Image: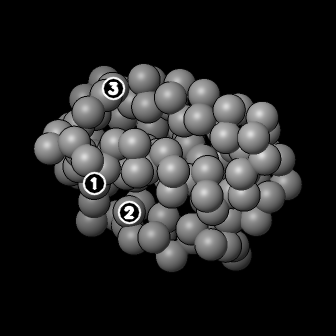
Amino acid sequence: MILSYQEIKEAVQDSFVSLYEKFAYSSKDTLYATIGEYDYSNDYTQIDECCIYVNFALMFLEKNESINFMKVRLLELVDEKNLEVYKMELNEEFNLFYSDLCKLQNTLNPT
């Protein structure tokens, strides 16, 4: 992992404000530009990508933006089989991550 969960959360929020709100990037461009900033690092892992996706999804939904463009990859990232790995990597921050993930459950898995 490049950053802690809280640091990723804050970095995503900063990217959202600067790219999406200030420079009017589309939702899709905002997400992919942010991922592009981290993707070059040798330390970048699937958990980094997952944390970025989860936090952008929360912010887009808060702004009543569709997350359909990212839903397939987000569902792959938050698949139950990955959660144990994330729990080990995130350690004490897993509860914060899981709490954020639960906020997305109705959108990701409507009943």
Residue 58: % across, % down: 66, 46
Residue 109 shows in the view: no
Amino acid of disc 3? Ser
Looking at the image, tell me whether mark 3 or mark 1 is earlier in sequence order: 3
Q: Secondary structure at mark 3?
A: loop
Q: Quadrant of the N terminus?
A: top left
In the drawing, what numbered circle is on residue 4? Answer: 3
Closer to us: 53 or 31: 31
Q: Amino acid at mark 2?
A: Leu
User: What label does residue 77 carry, if any?
Assistant: 2
From the image, tell me which residue sits under label 1: 46
In the rendered structure, which amino acid carries the disc numbered 1?
Gln
Q: In front of the other: label 1 or label 2? A: 1
Residue 28 lies in quadrant: bottom right
- Mark 1 touches mark 2? (CB < 8 Å): yes
Residue 19 location in percent, x, y? Answer: 67, 40
Alpha-carbon span between mark 1 and mark 2: 7 Å
Task: Classify mark 2: helix, strand or loop.
Answer: helix
Badge 3 density bin: few <14, some 14–19, many ≥20, Cα 10 Å: some
Q: Residue drawn 60% across and 28% down?
A: 14
From the viewer's perspective, tell me whether residue 55 is left or right of residue 87. Answer: right
Residue at image point 44% right, 24% down: 6
Q: Residue at x 40, y 51 (%)?
A: 36
Looking at this rendering, what residue extends furthest in the front direction?
Answer: 23
> In whole angstroms, how far apart are the C-alphas of marks 3 and 2?
17 Å
